[in-house]
Image (spheres, rainbow, N blue to C red):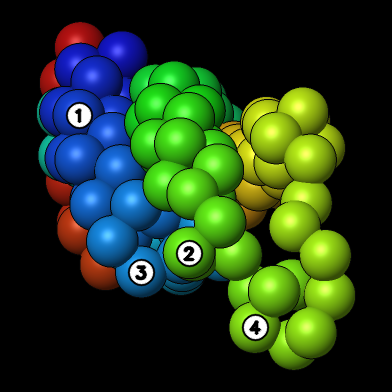
Amino acid sequence: MVKSGLIVGAVMFFIVLLLAVGISPLCALCVPLFTGLGAGYLTGIFDKPLSNSQAAQRGAIAGAIAGGISLPAQMIASVINAMVLQNPQFQLSQFFGGEVVDPTTVWLAQIAFAICIGLLNIGLTTAFGAGGGAIWFSTKGEKQVPVI
């Protein structure tokens, strides 16, 4: 479960970083669906649990590891976005006729938003990891022969 969590976590780190910087920090919420299922399924392949509950539990732990690895990516993306948003040319408030936002407010909002999205990613990846483990058990795990 640690092995699959680290593998999927590395992939998730780069995907979250690219999406959160390139498009929007909200795009990072799409990543846990596929990475969580992948982490849970890989856990089944690597660990071969003997029951559905074990597969779901180990998949959830692998998903939590992967989601935890993606949290620093979200934080790095928020720092990059805050640096870009400090430039008055890119501030949306000025586009709509408002005033320029204080840089401290930009930094605090970006960091707080990144923490919230990152924690939500951890929870979603954990839940989908449990689902991925259960999917593995229902497709491959029931047919395995227990080794003593």
Mark 1: which amino acid? Ala
The C terminus lies in which quarter of the figure?
top left
Q: Which of marks 2 and 3 is in front?
A: 2
CB contact under 8 Å: marks 4 and 2:
no
Between 126 and 142, the one lying in front of the other is 126
Determine crowd level at label 4: few under 14, some 14-19, many 20+ residues with C-alpha closer than 10 A.
Answer: few
Determine crowd level at label 1: few under 14, some 14-19, many 20+ residues with C-alpha closer than 10 A.
Answer: some
Label number found at residue 95? 4
Mark 2 → mark 3, Cα distance in angstroms: 18 Å
| N-terminal label among 1 and 3 | 1
Between 44 and 61, the one lying in front of the other is 61
What is the x, y in percent for residue 2?
31, 14
Q: Which of marks 1 and 4 is in front?
A: 4
Mark 4: which amino acid? Phe
CB contact under 8 Å: marks 1 and 3:
no
Mark 2 → mark 1, Cα distance in angstroms: 34 Å
Q: What residue sits right under mark 1 in the picture?
A: 10
Mark 4 → mark 3, Cα distance in angstroms: 19 Å
Mark 4 → mark 2, Cα distance in angstroms: 9 Å
Residue at x-position 24% and y-position 20%:
6
CB contact under 8 Å: marks 1 and 4:
no
Residue at x-position 44% and y-position 22%:
72
What is the x, y in percent for residue 26?
56, 65
Q: What residue sits right under mark 3 in the picture?
A: 23
Q: Is residue 106 visible?
A: yes
What is the x, y in percent for residue 80?
39, 36
| N-terminal label among 4 and 2 | 2
